[in-house]
Amino acid sequence: MIFTRNRMNHAKGVSLMEVLVVAAILTTILAIAMPSYGKYQIRVQQSAGRDFAREVISRQENYYIENLVYTTTPSDLDFPTPFRSKPAYYEAVLSQCPGPEPLSACVQVVASPVAPYDTNTMVITANTRQHWAETF
């Protein structure tokens, strides 16, 4: 009589070595992905800041069309207080442009990162003369 080995008699499941290999692979993938995700989040925050500054300048232009002067008051532009982007990555300050020009000629917005997003150190300066500056 010939005896054959029945594979069903062996234990089912995974070995410790297989679990360790899978854990090592997942750790490697996470080690590669996490810095990329952090950089992605910073780019999203910076993009939100740029969009916020553009929205402020756009509302300033609409306000100027109706009143023939710019404003430094966020509530005049229908922005809530505190004057922040949505989501609240940036906080803005409206002021007269530097130089001899009066408020009726130019206004600027300076958007600065808000904690806990202040690790994104880009400060956006925009004015109604279409001047943009991003400083890190």
Image (tube, helix red, strand yellow):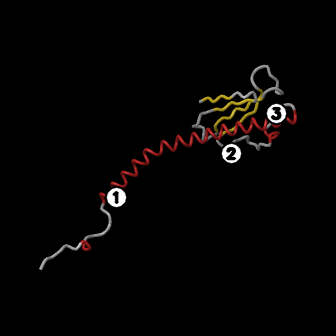
Residue holding disc 3 = 71
Q: Quadrant of the C terminus?
A: top right
> Residue type at mark 2?
Lys
Q: Is residue 76 above or below residue 14?
A: above
Residue holding disc 1 = 19
Q: Residue furthest bottom?
A: 1
Look at the image and tell me whether residue 105 can be seen. Answer: yes
Residue 51 placed where, x, y %? 68, 39
Q: Residue furthest top?
A: 100
Q: Is residue 110 above or below residue 117?
A: above
Look at the image and tell me whether residue 116 can be seen. Answer: no
* Residue drawn at x 30%, y 60% as measured from the top left: 16
> Residue type at mark 3?
Thr
> Residue type at mark 1?
Val
Residue holding disc 2 = 86
* Residue drawn at x 70%, y 41% as measured from the top left: 84
SS at mark 1 in the image: helix
Q: Is residue 44 left or right of residue 71?
A: left
Q: Is residue 46 left or right of residue 56?
A: left
SS at mark 2 in the image: loop
SS at mark 3 in the image: loop
User: Depth check: 68 or 15 in front?
Assistant: 68
Q: Are marks 1 and 3 in contact (CB under 8 Å)?
A: no
Q: Earlier in the sequence, mark 1 or mark 3?
A: 1
Q: Quadrant of the N terminus?
A: bottom left
| C-alpha distance separating marks 1 and 2 | 43 Å
Q: Earlier in the sequence, mark 1 or mark 2?
A: 1
Crowd class of label 2 (few under 14; some 14 to 19; many from 20; radius 10 Å): few
